[in-house]
Amino acid sequence: MNDNTALILKVHQSNYQIIGFTADVRIDELVMLGRKHKVPVMFDLGSGCLVDLKPYGIHSEPTVQEIIKAGVDLVSFSGDKLLGGPQGGIIVGKKKYIERIQKNPLARALRVDKLTIAAFEATLMAYMDPEGAMNTIPVLKMLFQPADEIKQRARKIASALKER
């Protein structure tokens, strides 16, 4: 860390694994380091989970809310994947950093259109009822679909493919 350090970035290992002699720095340690040196901390979550999946046996996927509560300044995540909305990136966090990002000329070039915003709004409104989201967000509904239902769908698809 030196005068040129502008940001501490942690990336969630959702799509890769590092094996061997490695260690993972806890997010609370990075937050303390950032505060000590007055450097913002950002966590790229990747999939952007808004529902606690631990009760369903998935312990490796932190929620956006957990990361914000840990004191991170910025969190980025995907609008599709686990969130279940349209494809696009989402950045949430402290107002002063969001405003700086919005002022960057790239923000205009990379902004989403009104239809995408409307789709995000509809998706996020479904999360107002977390239990209901499990039944209305397609990716969550499929993630927790009983094995028998998945087998039945697979047989139906295999039969349709054989006919063609």
Image (cartoon, rainbow, N blue to C red):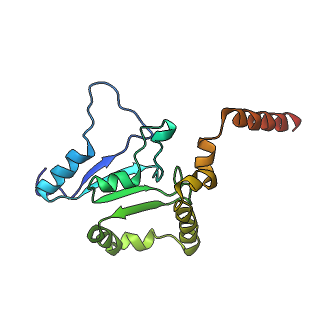
Q: How many marks?
A: 0
The answer to whether residue 153 is above or below residue 78 is: above
| Quarter of the figure with residue 38 | bottom left
Q: Look at 51% across and 39% down and name the residue there.
A: 56
Where is residue 106? Give x, y as percent: 38, 69
Where is residue 2? Give x, y as percent: 11, 53
Where is residue 111? Give x, y as percent: 46, 70
Lateral position of residue 74 relative to residue 84, left or right: left
Return the residue found at the far top: 20
Q: Quadrant of the C terminus?
A: top right
> Of residues 63 and 159, which is closer to you in this image?
63
Q: Look at 54% across and 73% down and name the residue there.
A: 113
Return the residue found at the far right: 163
| Quarter of the figure with residue 137 | bottom right
Where is residue 11? Give x, y as percent: 34, 46
> Of residues 44 and 109, which is closer to you in this image?
44
Q: Look at 58% across and 50% down and name the residue there.
A: 134
Q: Look at 85% across and 33% down and name the residue there.
A: 162
> Of residues 162 and 144, which is closer to you in this image?
144
Lateral position of residue 157 relative to residue 119, left or right: right
